[in-house]
Image (cartoon, rainbow, N blue to C red):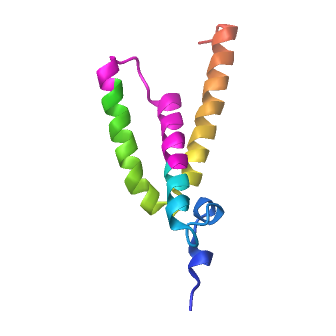
Amino acid sequence: MVNVEDRLSFFPALYRVDTNPDAGMWYLYITIVLLSILVYKLGFAKKLPLLKNVLIYLFLITGCTVLTFLAIFLPVTEGLIIAALILIIYKIRLRREQAKGNV
């Protein structure tokens, strides 16, 4: 018989979703929301009016609910971390090139 603990992704195992589902799922949800906001801000955000920004973040937070359930057994959180790291590296290199005047 396969143990559920062995199938959990890293962050659900870290937050102990299997033994304390209430707190663990909230921690996982907040982590996914924060990482999603970071990835959105680094890669896709444009200057928008306040109401449109609120609407975008509302849909982003709502969509993270589905991602949280998928993240229990799939590496959703880890993928968001990788995406954030890639976008941070891109932004750093872009700013360096802009400072040199190459862009």
Choose top left, top right, bottom left or bottom right for residue 85.
Answer: top right
Q: Is residue 34 magenta?
A: yes
Seen at 66% across and 24% down, the residue is 92
> Picture coordinates of residue 86 (x, y %)?
61, 38
Q: How many marks?
A: 0
The spot of residue 73 in percent (x, y) is: 51, 68
Tell me what residue is drawn at x 63 percent, y 12 percent: 98
* Visible residue check, residue 73: no
- Magenta stretch? 30-52
Instruction: Give whichever of 29, 45 is nearer the camera.
Output: 29
Residue drawn at 48 percent across, 44 percent down: 33
Q: Is residue 100 magenta?
A: no
Residue 96, above or below 24: above
Please give the name of the residue rendered at 38% of the width and 34% of the height, measured from the top-left corner. 57
Q: Position of residue 1 (x, y in %)?
A: 56, 92
- Front in this rendered view, residue 47 or 11: 11
10 with respect to 53 (left or right): right
